Amino acid sequence: MSSTTPRNTAKRRLRSVLVALLGALVPLLAATFLTAPAASAAPAAALTEVTNFGANPSNLRMYVYVPNNVAPNPAVLVGVHWCTGSGPDFYNGTEYASLADRYGFIVVYPSVTRSSKCFDVSSPEALRRGGGSDPVGIKSMVDWVTRTYDADTDRIYATGVSSGAMMTNVLLGDYPDVFAAGSAFSGVPFGCFATTNGSEWNSDCSNGNITHTPQQWGDLARAAYPGYTGPRPRMQIWHGTEDDVLRYPNFGEQIKQWTNVQGVSQTPARTDSPQANWTRTRYGSTGDRAPVEAISLQGVGHNLIAGGMAARVITFFGLDSTGPAPQPQPGACRVAVTTNAWSTGLTASVTITNTGTTSVNAWQLGFTLPSGQSITNGWGATYSPASGAVTATNATYNGTIAPNASVTIGYQASHTGTTAAPGGFALNGKACTVT
Protein backbone atom coordinates (compact mmCIF):
# COMPACT_ATOMS: atom_id res chain seq x y z
CA MET A 1 0.00 0.00 0.00
CA SER A 2 1.46 3.40 -0.96
CA SER A 3 2.46 5.71 1.88
CA THR A 4 1.64 8.77 -0.20
CA THR A 5 -1.30 10.73 1.12
CA PRO A 6 -3.31 13.40 -0.65
CA ARG A 7 -1.69 15.98 1.65
CA ASN A 8 1.84 14.86 0.67
CA THR A 9 0.90 14.96 -2.99
CA ALA A 10 -0.32 18.54 -2.65
CA LYS A 11 2.91 19.56 -0.95
CA ARG A 12 4.98 18.03 -3.74
CA ARG A 13 2.96 19.88 -6.40
CA LEU A 14 3.36 23.22 -4.52
CA ARG A 15 7.11 22.64 -4.20
CA SER A 16 7.34 21.98 -7.95
CA VAL A 17 5.50 25.20 -8.72
CA LEU A 18 7.76 27.24 -6.42
CA VAL A 19 10.90 25.73 -7.94
CA ALA A 20 9.64 26.57 -11.41
CA LEU A 21 8.84 30.13 -10.38
CA LEU A 22 12.24 30.62 -8.79
CA GLY A 23 13.92 29.21 -11.86
CA ALA A 24 12.20 31.85 -13.94
CA LEU A 25 12.72 34.71 -11.48
CA VAL A 26 16.44 34.24 -10.76
CA PRO A 27 17.60 35.07 -14.32
CA LEU A 28 15.15 37.95 -14.42
CA LEU A 29 16.39 39.41 -11.10
CA ALA A 30 20.00 38.91 -12.13
CA ALA A 31 19.39 40.74 -15.38
CA THR A 32 17.67 43.54 -13.51
CA PHE A 33 20.56 44.07 -11.07
CA LEU A 34 23.17 43.78 -13.80
CA THR A 35 21.51 46.37 -15.97
CA ALA A 36 20.46 48.83 -13.20
CA PRO A 37 22.26 52.20 -13.46
CA ALA A 38 25.05 52.77 -10.93
CA ALA A 39 24.38 55.28 -8.17
CA SER A 40 25.55 58.72 -9.34
CA ALA A 41 28.26 60.63 -7.43
CA ALA A 42 27.28 63.72 -5.49
CA PRO A 43 27.19 66.72 -7.83
CA ALA A 44 30.21 68.99 -7.69
CA ALA A 45 29.81 72.21 -5.73
CA ALA A 46 29.16 75.20 -7.99
CA LEU A 47 29.01 78.96 -7.86
CA THR A 48 25.41 79.96 -7.16
CA GLU A 49 23.69 83.33 -7.35
CA VAL A 50 21.56 84.38 -4.38
CA THR A 51 18.83 87.02 -4.68
CA ASN A 52 16.75 88.81 -2.03
CA PHE A 53 19.54 88.42 0.52
CA GLY A 54 18.73 91.61 2.45
CA ALA A 55 19.37 95.36 2.35
CA ASN A 56 21.17 96.16 -0.89
CA PRO A 57 21.02 99.90 -1.62
CA SER A 58 23.51 99.84 -4.52
CA ASN A 59 22.05 96.81 -6.31
CA LEU A 60 25.01 94.47 -5.91
CA ARG A 61 24.67 90.86 -7.04
CA MET A 62 25.61 88.05 -4.69
CA TYR A 63 27.31 84.79 -5.59
CA VAL A 64 28.22 82.10 -3.09
CA TYR A 65 30.37 78.98 -3.19
CA VAL A 66 29.59 76.28 -0.64
CA PRO A 67 31.90 73.25 -0.83
CA ASN A 68 30.45 69.75 -0.62
CA ASN A 69 32.39 69.16 2.60
CA VAL A 70 31.38 72.43 4.24
CA ALA A 71 32.45 72.43 7.87
CA PRO A 72 30.02 72.68 10.78
CA ASN A 73 29.73 76.37 11.77
CA PRO A 74 31.94 77.29 8.82
CA ALA A 75 34.09 80.36 8.41
CA VAL A 76 33.10 82.85 5.70
CA LEU A 77 35.44 84.57 3.26
CA VAL A 78 34.28 87.57 1.20
CA GLY A 79 36.23 87.74 -2.09
CA VAL A 80 35.99 91.19 -3.68
CA HIS A 81 36.73 91.72 -7.37
CA TRP A 82 38.71 94.38 -9.23
CA CYS A 83 37.36 97.22 -11.42
CA THR A 84 35.73 95.92 -14.66
CA GLY A 85 35.48 92.50 -12.99
CA SER A 86 32.65 90.56 -11.40
CA GLY A 87 31.99 88.01 -8.71
CA PRO A 88 32.22 85.12 -11.21
CA ASP A 89 35.49 86.59 -12.53
CA PHE A 90 36.97 86.55 -9.03
CA TYR A 91 35.69 83.01 -8.53
CA ASN A 92 37.31 81.83 -11.78
CA GLY A 93 40.48 83.88 -11.46
CA THR A 94 41.52 83.03 -7.91
CA GLU A 95 42.18 79.90 -5.86
CA TYR A 96 39.77 80.51 -3.00
CA ALA A 97 37.11 78.02 -4.15
CA SER A 98 39.63 75.17 -4.32
CA LEU A 99 40.93 76.16 -0.88
CA ALA A 100 37.33 76.16 0.37
CA ASP A 101 37.05 72.57 -0.94
CA ARG A 102 40.09 71.68 1.13
CA TYR A 103 39.25 73.50 4.36
CA GLY A 104 35.44 73.67 4.39
CA PHE A 105 34.80 77.42 4.53
CA ILE A 106 32.24 79.33 2.43
CA VAL A 107 33.17 82.04 -0.09
CA VAL A 108 30.92 85.01 -0.93
CA TYR A 109 31.61 86.89 -4.17
CA PRO A 110 29.92 90.33 -4.34
CA SER A 111 29.47 91.69 -7.86
CA VAL A 112 29.06 95.34 -8.92
CA THR A 113 26.32 96.25 -11.40
CA ARG A 114 27.20 99.93 -12.02
CA SER A 115 28.83 100.60 -15.39
CA SER A 116 32.39 101.04 -14.07
CA LYS A 117 32.22 97.68 -12.25
CA CYS A 118 34.23 99.40 -9.49
CA PHE A 119 33.21 99.25 -5.85
CA ASP A 120 32.22 102.46 -4.09
CA VAL A 121 35.11 103.23 -1.75
CA SER A 122 34.93 107.02 -2.06
CA SER A 123 31.47 108.33 -1.20
CA PRO A 124 30.56 109.57 2.30
CA GLU A 125 27.93 106.80 2.38
CA ALA A 126 30.52 104.09 1.78
CA LEU A 127 32.87 105.38 4.45
CA ARG A 128 30.57 105.02 7.43
CA ARG A 129 28.86 102.07 9.03
CA GLY A 130 25.37 101.51 7.63
CA GLY A 131 25.85 104.46 5.27
CA GLY A 132 23.76 103.10 2.42
CA SER A 133 26.21 101.99 -0.29
CA ASP A 134 28.16 98.86 -1.28
CA PRO A 135 29.37 97.96 2.24
CA VAL A 136 25.75 97.64 3.39
CA GLY A 137 24.97 95.13 0.63
CA ILE A 138 28.10 93.11 1.42
CA LYS A 139 27.20 93.07 5.11
CA SER A 140 23.74 91.72 4.12
CA MET A 141 25.42 88.93 2.14
CA VAL A 142 27.46 87.96 5.21
CA ASP A 143 24.33 88.00 7.36
CA TRP A 144 22.49 85.79 4.85
CA VAL A 145 25.29 83.21 4.88
CA THR A 146 25.59 83.16 8.67
CA ARG A 147 21.82 82.60 8.98
CA THR A 148 21.58 80.00 6.24
CA TYR A 149 24.63 77.92 7.13
CA ASP A 150 24.98 78.68 10.84
CA ALA A 151 28.38 80.18 10.08
CA ASP A 152 30.83 81.20 12.79
CA THR A 153 30.42 84.94 13.30
CA ASP A 154 33.89 85.11 14.87
CA ARG A 155 35.49 83.90 11.62
CA ILE A 156 34.38 86.32 8.90
CA TYR A 157 37.14 87.55 6.57
CA ALA A 158 37.57 89.75 3.49
CA THR A 159 40.11 89.84 0.68
CA GLY A 160 40.27 91.66 -2.61
CA VAL A 161 42.38 92.96 -5.47
CA SER A 162 42.65 96.62 -6.57
CA SER A 163 39.11 98.02 -6.17
CA GLY A 164 38.41 94.92 -4.08
CA ALA A 165 41.48 95.66 -1.95
CA MET A 166 40.22 99.18 -1.35
CA MET A 167 36.84 97.72 -0.39
CA THR A 168 38.59 95.30 1.98
CA ASN A 169 40.06 98.32 3.78
CA VAL A 170 36.62 99.96 3.84
CA LEU A 171 34.86 96.86 5.19
CA LEU A 172 37.35 96.55 8.04
CA GLY A 173 36.81 100.20 8.92
CA ASP A 174 33.01 100.17 8.64
CA TYR A 175 32.44 96.80 10.29
CA PRO A 176 35.26 96.04 12.76
CA ASP A 177 32.74 94.01 14.77
CA VAL A 178 31.99 91.75 11.77
CA PHE A 179 35.36 91.05 10.13
CA ALA A 180 38.14 89.28 12.00
CA ALA A 181 40.82 90.07 9.39
CA GLY A 182 41.39 91.25 5.84
CA SER A 183 43.95 90.86 3.07
CA ALA A 184 44.36 93.65 0.51
CA PHE A 185 46.24 93.23 -2.80
CA SER A 186 47.25 96.53 -4.47
CA GLY A 187 44.97 98.75 -2.42
CA VAL A 188 44.92 102.05 -0.52
CA PRO A 189 44.13 102.97 3.08
CA PHE A 190 40.60 103.43 4.39
CA GLY A 191 39.46 106.95 3.49
CA CYS A 192 42.26 107.67 1.02
CA PHE A 193 39.92 107.56 -1.97
CA ALA A 194 37.28 109.80 -0.33
CA THR A 195 35.52 112.26 -2.62
CA THR A 196 32.54 114.57 -2.16
CA ASN A 197 31.71 115.37 -5.81
CA GLY A 198 30.29 112.00 -6.82
CA SER A 199 33.47 110.90 -8.57
CA GLU A 200 34.57 107.31 -8.13
CA TRP A 201 38.23 108.18 -8.67
CA ASN A 202 40.72 110.11 -6.55
CA SER A 203 43.90 110.82 -8.50
CA ASP A 204 45.80 112.23 -5.52
CA CYS A 205 45.32 108.96 -3.68
CA SER A 206 45.98 106.69 -6.65
CA ASN A 207 49.23 108.56 -7.37
CA GLY A 208 50.40 108.11 -3.79
CA ASN A 209 50.27 111.82 -2.99
CA ILE A 210 48.08 111.57 0.12
CA THR A 211 50.08 111.00 3.29
CA HIS A 212 49.04 111.25 6.92
CA THR A 213 50.52 110.42 10.28
CA PRO A 214 49.63 106.99 11.67
CA GLN A 215 47.30 108.66 14.19
CA GLN A 216 45.47 110.58 11.44
CA TRP A 217 45.01 107.43 9.35
CA GLY A 218 43.86 105.51 12.39
CA ASP A 219 41.37 108.23 13.28
CA LEU A 220 39.88 108.05 9.77
CA ALA A 221 39.23 104.33 10.13
CA ARG A 222 37.86 104.67 13.66
CA ALA A 223 35.50 107.48 12.60
CA ALA A 224 33.55 105.04 10.42
CA TYR A 225 32.04 103.50 13.56
CA PRO A 226 32.15 106.13 16.31
CA GLY A 227 32.08 104.81 19.82
CA TYR A 228 33.19 101.29 18.96
CA THR A 229 35.72 100.03 21.51
CA GLY A 230 35.93 96.32 20.69
CA PRO A 231 38.73 94.37 19.03
CA ARG A 232 39.92 95.49 15.61
CA PRO A 233 40.50 93.28 12.56
CA ARG A 234 44.01 92.13 11.65
CA MET A 235 45.29 93.21 8.25
CA GLN A 236 47.55 91.70 5.60
CA ILE A 237 48.81 94.10 2.89
CA TRP A 238 50.37 93.21 -0.49
CA HIS A 239 51.85 95.72 -2.96
CA GLY A 240 54.23 95.80 -5.92
CA THR A 241 56.94 98.45 -5.99
CA GLU A 242 56.20 99.21 -9.66
CA ASP A 243 52.42 99.59 -9.30
CA ASP A 244 51.42 102.29 -11.80
CA VAL A 245 47.69 102.32 -10.97
CA LEU A 246 47.62 102.59 -7.17
CA ARG A 247 51.18 103.63 -6.56
CA TYR A 248 53.54 102.11 -4.04
CA PRO A 249 53.44 104.88 -1.38
CA ASN A 250 49.94 103.59 -0.57
CA PHE A 251 51.58 100.46 0.80
CA GLY A 252 53.38 102.38 3.52
CA GLU A 253 50.31 104.47 4.28
CA GLN A 254 48.25 101.32 4.85
CA ILE A 255 50.92 100.02 7.23
CA LYS A 256 50.72 103.30 9.15
CA GLN A 257 46.94 103.07 9.36
CA TRP A 258 46.51 99.50 10.47
CA THR A 259 49.42 99.44 12.93
CA ASN A 260 47.82 102.48 14.55
CA VAL A 261 44.37 100.89 14.52
CA GLN A 262 45.86 97.77 16.11
CA GLY A 263 47.84 99.83 18.60
CA VAL A 264 51.18 98.22 17.72
CA SER A 265 54.60 99.63 16.89
CA GLN A 266 55.46 100.67 13.36
CA THR A 267 58.80 98.97 13.88
CA PRO A 268 58.52 95.41 12.56
CA ALA A 269 58.68 92.59 15.06
CA ARG A 270 60.06 90.41 12.29
CA THR A 271 61.38 90.90 8.75
CA ASP A 272 62.04 88.08 6.30
CA SER A 273 61.95 87.15 2.63
CA PRO A 274 59.65 84.14 2.07
CA GLN A 275 60.30 84.28 -1.66
CA ALA A 276 62.82 85.92 -3.99
CA ASN A 277 62.22 89.69 -4.29
CA TRP A 278 59.64 89.65 -1.48
CA THR A 279 60.11 91.53 1.79
CA ARG A 280 57.65 90.56 4.50
CA THR A 281 57.33 92.58 7.68
CA ARG A 282 55.19 91.65 10.67
CA TYR A 283 54.02 94.10 13.29
CA GLY A 284 52.88 93.40 16.83
CA SER A 285 54.11 89.78 16.83
CA THR A 286 56.29 87.49 14.74
CA GLY A 287 53.90 84.65 13.84
CA ASP A 288 51.65 83.80 10.91
CA ARG A 289 48.74 85.68 12.49
CA ALA A 290 50.44 88.92 13.43
CA PRO A 291 48.18 91.95 13.94
CA VAL A 292 49.57 93.44 10.71
CA GLU A 293 51.56 91.70 7.98
CA ALA A 294 52.91 93.48 4.91
CA ILE A 295 54.48 91.95 1.79
CA SER A 296 56.39 94.19 -0.62
CA LEU A 297 57.11 92.70 -4.06
CA GLN A 298 60.19 94.22 -5.72
CA GLY A 299 59.76 95.06 -9.42
CA VAL A 300 56.12 93.91 -9.55
CA GLY A 301 53.28 96.01 -11.00
CA HIS A 302 49.59 96.40 -10.22
CA ASN A 303 48.43 92.97 -11.35
CA LEU A 304 50.47 91.18 -8.72
CA ILE A 305 48.26 88.26 -7.70
CA ALA A 306 49.81 84.90 -8.58
CA GLY A 307 49.40 81.22 -7.78
CA GLY A 308 50.08 80.32 -4.19
CA MET A 309 49.34 83.76 -2.76
CA ALA A 310 45.79 82.77 -1.79
CA ALA A 311 47.17 79.97 0.37
CA ARG A 312 49.25 82.56 2.26
CA VAL A 313 46.08 84.58 2.80
CA ILE A 314 44.34 81.51 4.21
CA THR A 315 47.28 80.93 6.55
CA PHE A 316 47.14 84.53 7.77
CA PHE A 317 43.41 84.15 8.42
CA GLY A 318 43.99 80.83 10.17
CA LEU A 319 41.59 78.94 7.90
CA ASP A 320 44.07 76.15 7.20
CA SER A 321 44.03 74.84 10.78
CA THR A 322 41.75 74.72 13.78
CA GLY A 323 44.27 75.63 16.46
CA PRO A 324 46.37 78.73 17.06
CA ALA A 325 49.12 79.37 14.55
CA PRO A 326 52.57 78.31 15.71
CA GLN A 327 54.77 81.21 16.69
CA PRO A 328 58.34 80.99 15.40
CA GLN A 329 60.73 80.39 18.25
CA PRO A 330 63.65 82.78 18.71
CA GLY A 331 67.04 81.54 17.62
CA ALA A 332 69.99 81.25 19.98
CA CYS A 333 70.77 84.95 19.85
CA ARG A 334 70.11 88.12 21.80
CA VAL A 335 70.38 91.71 20.60
CA ALA A 336 70.76 94.90 22.61
CA VAL A 337 70.52 98.21 20.77
CA THR A 338 71.02 101.83 21.86
CA THR A 339 70.65 104.99 19.80
CA ASN A 340 71.93 108.54 20.18
CA ALA A 341 70.07 111.13 18.09
CA TRP A 342 70.40 114.77 17.12
CA SER A 343 68.39 117.04 14.81
CA THR A 344 69.09 115.30 11.50
CA GLY A 345 71.05 112.18 12.42
CA LEU A 346 71.76 109.44 14.90
CA THR A 347 74.19 106.71 15.82
CA ALA A 348 73.24 103.20 16.85
CA SER A 349 75.20 100.55 18.71
CA VAL A 350 74.05 96.94 18.29
CA THR A 351 75.43 94.11 20.46
CA ILE A 352 74.79 90.56 19.23
CA THR A 353 75.15 87.73 21.77
CA ASN A 354 75.32 84.06 20.82
CA THR A 355 73.18 82.35 23.47
CA GLY A 356 73.55 78.91 21.87
CA THR A 357 75.97 76.07 22.53
CA THR A 358 77.81 76.15 19.19
CA SER A 359 79.73 78.88 17.38
CA VAL A 360 77.99 81.10 14.82
CA ASN A 361 80.12 81.49 11.72
CA ALA A 362 79.85 83.85 8.74
CA TRP A 363 76.88 85.66 10.25
CA GLN A 364 74.36 88.08 8.82
CA LEU A 365 72.07 90.19 10.99
CA GLY A 366 68.81 91.32 9.43
CA PHE A 367 66.78 94.22 10.85
CA THR A 368 64.39 96.95 9.71
CA LEU A 369 65.06 100.67 10.01
CA PRO A 370 62.13 102.95 10.84
CA SER A 371 60.72 105.00 7.97
CA GLY A 372 62.86 108.04 7.09
CA GLN A 373 66.16 106.64 8.41
CA SER A 374 69.07 105.89 6.09
CA ILE A 375 72.51 104.54 7.02
CA THR A 376 75.36 106.83 5.95
CA ASN A 377 78.27 104.81 7.34
CA GLY A 378 78.92 101.90 9.68
CA TRP A 379 81.50 99.84 11.53
CA GLY A 380 81.90 96.20 12.48
CA ALA A 381 79.87 95.06 9.45
CA THR A 382 78.83 96.01 5.93
CA TYR A 383 75.25 97.26 5.57
CA SER A 384 72.96 96.83 2.58
CA PRO A 385 70.66 98.44 1.58
CA ALA A 386 70.91 101.74 3.43
CA SER A 387 67.24 101.89 4.44
CA GLY A 388 64.23 99.66 4.97
CA ALA A 389 65.04 95.96 5.48
CA VAL A 390 68.81 96.03 6.10
CA THR A 391 71.31 93.16 6.25
CA ALA A 392 74.53 93.64 8.24
CA THR A 393 77.26 91.17 7.15
CA ASN A 394 80.21 90.37 9.41
CA ALA A 395 83.66 91.89 8.93
CA THR A 396 86.67 89.63 8.40
CA TYR A 397 87.79 89.95 12.03
CA ASN A 398 84.47 89.17 13.76
CA GLY A 399 82.93 86.48 11.58
CA THR A 400 82.78 83.93 14.39
CA ILE A 401 80.75 84.39 17.58
CA ALA A 402 81.55 81.73 20.17
CA PRO A 403 78.88 80.43 22.58
CA ASN A 404 78.00 83.14 25.14
CA ALA A 405 80.26 85.61 23.31
CA SER A 406 79.17 88.97 21.89
CA VAL A 407 80.00 91.20 18.94
CA THR A 408 79.20 94.91 18.83
CA ILE A 409 78.60 96.73 15.58
CA GLY A 410 77.21 100.16 14.82
CA TYR A 411 76.22 102.71 12.24
CA GLN A 412 75.42 106.35 11.67
CA ALA A 413 72.18 107.30 9.96
CA SER A 414 70.25 110.33 8.81
CA HIS A 415 66.58 110.69 9.74
CA THR A 416 63.58 112.83 8.84
CA GLY A 417 62.11 112.98 12.33
CA THR A 418 61.80 109.39 13.51
CA THR A 419 64.70 108.45 15.79
CA ALA A 420 63.45 105.08 17.06
CA ALA A 421 65.70 102.05 17.21
CA PRO A 422 65.49 99.39 14.49
CA GLY A 423 63.55 96.18 15.05
CA GLY A 424 62.87 92.72 13.66
CA PHE A 425 66.37 91.37 14.33
CA ALA A 426 67.26 87.94 12.90
CA LEU A 427 70.68 86.27 12.95
CA ASN A 428 71.24 84.00 9.93
CA GLY A 429 67.48 83.88 9.44
CA LYS A 430 66.58 83.07 13.08
CA ALA A 431 64.67 85.66 15.13
CA CYS A 432 66.64 87.15 18.03
CA THR A 433 65.39 88.15 21.45
CA VAL A 434 65.73 91.92 21.91
CA THR A 435 66.72 93.35 25.27
Image (cartoon, rainbow, N blue to C red):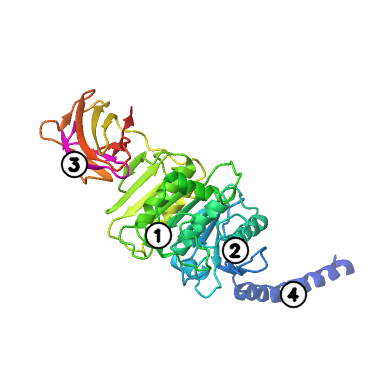
Q: Earlier in the sequence, mark 3 or mark 1?
A: 1
Give x and y (percent) for residue 97.
50, 62
Q: Which residue is mark 2?
A: 133
Q: CA distance from mark 2 to mark 1?
A: 22 Å
Question: Disc 1 or disc 4, which is closer to the eye?
Answer: 1
Give x and y (percent) for residue 77.
53, 56
Give x and y (percent) for residue 311.
42, 54
Q: CA distance from mark 3 to mark 1?
A: 32 Å
Which residue occupies the foreground of this view, 285 or 415? 415
Which residue occupies the foreground of this view, 13 or 41? 41
Residue 186 numbered mark, or none: 1
Q: Residues within 10 Å of mark 2 (few under 14, many from 20)?
A: many
Q: Residues within 10 Å of mark 3 (few under 14, many from 20)?
A: some
At label 1, the amino acid type is Ser
Residue 21 numbered mark, or none: 4
Which residue occupies the foreground of this view, 325 or 372? 372
Kind of element beneath mark 2: loop
Residue 244, picture quadrant: bottom left
Question: Disc 3 or disc 1, which is closer to the eye?
Answer: 3
Kind of element beneath mark 3: strand
Dots 2, 1 in contact, CB < 8 A = no
Dots 3, 1 in contact, CB < 8 A = no
Question: Disc 3 or disc 2, which is closer to the eye?
Answer: 3
Question: With 336 as the anchor, is 285 left or right in this view?
Answer: right
- Which residue shows up at 61% across the image and 70% down it? 59
User: Relative to 364, is 251 above or below?
Assistant: below
Q: Earlier in the sequence, mark 2 or mark 1?
A: 2
Residue 60, picture quadrant: bottom right
